[in-house]
Amino acid sequence: EAGVTQFPSHSVIEKGQTVTLRCDPISGHDNLYWYRRVMGKEIKFLLHFVKESKQDESGMPNNRFLAERTGGTYSTLKVQPAELEDSGVYFCASSLQGGGNTEAFFGQGTRLTVV
Amino acid sequence: GDSVTQMEGPVTLSEEAFLTINCTYTATGYPSLFWYVQYPGEGLQLLLKATKADDKGSNKGFEATYRKETTSFHLEKGSVQVSDSAVYFCALSDPLYSGGGADGLTFGKGTHLIIQP
């Protein structure tokens, strides 16, 4: 069974450009999460989808970030326009059910560098 | 809001040494507690978890006990191996959330563990 897949693995863009990150969750997992780890800091929750609906987007830093999950399958996270402080590793995770008792499976992450 | 504090790294040990990585938390409700591990070039993997006070999670020789009285979930292993070299993250999930989403995770900063042969 394929795990959570993220693309690209690395991205280097200039300030002001647009970048779109993609996450393919484990098939059948309704719950999909985005997290971000800025260098040397905690992994921070960004948002949570249940199927195609945004269950919780309280962690999204600002309106330059747009997440979508059309059809309830894969998800994209777009940053437009990118700023230097957006650099970090973006993780996606999926789980069969929501709630703390269900294991979340993580992708390898996308390392974003804004120069 | 909720938070997780874990010891700063890197932590460097010799093979077969005893390992402790400290983790303490602050939570609004009654959280579940987790340790995740990230091996080089891989994604985060769940190492172990505990869902209520006094529960002990264990896996691959690692253990952690949910201590409500000290709000701690320290990770231990009796004899580490070179293959244990990785970054370890302590995390919690709090249904009364503050910071990780109601179903999301609140993580610590991670501890880089280096095991030397």
Image (cartoon, coloured by chain):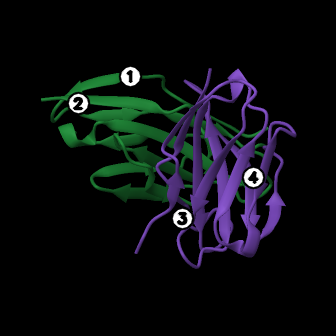
Chain colours: A purple, B green
* Closer to viewer: mark 1 or mark 4: 4
The amino acid on which the numbered mark 2 sits, given as a three-letter code, is Ile
Residue at 28%, 55% (x, y): give it: B60
Q: Residues within 10 Å of mark 1 (few under 14, many from 20)?
A: few
**Circles 1 and 4 in contact, beta carbons < 8 Å:** no
Residue at 71%, 73% (x, y): give it: A72
As drawn, the residue found furthest toward the right would be A63
Report the residue marked by disc 4.
Answer: A47
Q: CA distance from mark 1 to mark 4?
A: 30 Å
For the residue pair A63 and B10, the one nearer the viewer reads as A63
Element on which disc 4 rests:
strand
The amino acid on which the numbered mark 4 sits, given as a three-letter code, is Leu
Q: CA distance from mark 1 to mark 3?
A: 27 Å
Q: Earlier in the sequence, mark 4 or mark 3?
A: 4
Residue at 38%, 47% (x, y): give it: B42
Residue A30 image point, x, y percent: 67, 74
Q: Earlier in the sequence, mark 2 or mark 1?
A: 1
Element on which disc 3 rests:
loop
Q: Quadrant of the C terminus of chain A?
A: top right
Q: Residues within 10 Å of mark 2 (few under 14, many from 20)?
A: some
Element on which disc 2 rests:
strand
For the residue pair B50 and B90, the one nearer the viewer reads as B90
Letter of the chain that mark 4 sits on in the rendering: A
Marks 2/1 same chain = yes
The amino acid on which the numbered mark 3 sits, given as a three-letter code, is Glu
* Closer to viewer: mark 2 or mark 4: 4
Q: Quadrant of the N terminus of chain A?
A: bottom left
Element on which disc 1 rests:
loop
Report the residue marked by disc 1.
Answer: B10
Q: CA distance from mark 2 to mark 3?
A: 27 Å
**Circles 2 and 4 in contact, beta carbons < 8 Å:** no
Residue A94 image point, x, y percent: 59, 64
